[in-house]
Amino acid sequence: MKLRMPEYYKQFKCIADKCKDSCCSAGWEIDIDDDTAKLYDSVSGEFGEKLHKSIDNSCGNRHFILDEHNNCPFLKDGLCEIFTKLGEHSLCKICSEHPRYYEWFTDLKEGGIGLCCEEAARIILSFDKKFTTYDVNDDESDDELDTDSDNYDEDLYTFLKTARNKIIAHLEDNSIDFNNRIRDVIWYGNVLQQDIDFNLLDDEEIVDVTLSESSNLIDIFDFLCTLELNDNNWSDYLKDCSKVYTSNYTKLDEFEAKHPEVNDYLKNIAIYFIWRYFLKGCFDEDVLSKIKLMAVSVSIIRAMIFCKWLDKNSIKLEDCVDIVKKYSEEIEYCEDNLLKFFKASYELEAFNVEKIIGLFK
Ligand code: SF4
């Protein structure tokens, strides 16, 4: 099978002890796959004892017992003790693959690196070339095929692949104002969804959308506050951002004029969401909620970066990386939150197409 990855993936290497906020201290449950669990069972001596004591076997899926600070118990001076004591091959699948993600189709595995990792976020935000991908042969993928990998309509898959290329090309078209590009793509998603619903896979074009109605982010911030928390401070942070953004949004034009590079970061974030989620629409015949995820994420992340700028009177790539990483950890890397988002995208008034278009004035 072929594995297709974004070109920027070639730049990725975990920065380990140089990472400010390692994924090993993100408070996530780290499941241990069966093969690695067997290997850990066979380790003896002092380190073997630590390994056995640090694994919870009680509820079917074996995982590491986090320490009192919610860190992986093997994180020592920013490095992984399992890696340093037993070697890279001894890492469980989750640890050796993170922050890579994959999607399986019949003849192709696609992947990338997730924004929840600070080095991945740095690479993605600062990427200054056209988005391209490359293929490698990945024989191991033939053993990994899951049952859903061919559970889709081939015509829909081809239709969405063409649509995704058009969306990415449109997002990259610097001759069009950034807000306009996002508006056009949201409307295009709406048209595509109607085509899918009526089983008319027409070759639609992306058209220029003028602003329909203005809207604000308060309802969306409020919705995000109802989601599950990974970090207990996240909800207060969202509430603060909502207040600060609402009382200062008239300064948004000034911010955009002073920091045009932020729109480049946001464009890369938009492409990340489209690359990662849009083609999943061939499994559930729903592309509109994936487009809304992209648009809402871009809008909220922009608001957070804007608030940071108001606070510091300056903004650097590193500030943006921290914001994006946190957003991704809280919203994107919690399966329940993503499902709630996709459901809300059809149920909440604030998520209707015109309102979301209105966020991009
Ligand atoms: S967050 Fe990324 S760079 Fe940092 S330790 Fe994890 S994988 Fe490595």
Image (cartoon, rainbow, N blue to C red):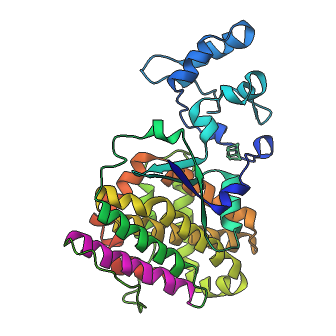
Is 85 placed left or right of 141 in the picture? right
Residue shown at the point (57%, 33%) measured from the top left? 93
Does 43 sit above or below residue 249?
above
Camera-side residue of 80 and 9: 9
Camera-side residue of 146 and 304: 146
The reply to whether residue 53 is visible in this rendering is no
Residue 48, horizontal then vertical, whole percent: 68, 12
> For the view shown, which residue lies furthest in the top direction?
45
Camera-side residue of 99 and 337: 99
Residue shown at the point (74%, 9%) measured from the top left? 46
Camera-side residue of 2 and 304: 2
Q: Is residue 187 magenta?
A: yes
* Image quadrant, ligand 1: top right
Residue shown at the point (71%, 30%) measured from the top left? 88
Residue 212, horizontal then vertical, whole percent: 37, 89
> For the view shown, which residue lies furthest in the left direction?
198
Magenta extent? 176-197
Residue 106, horizontal then vertical, whole percent: 39, 50
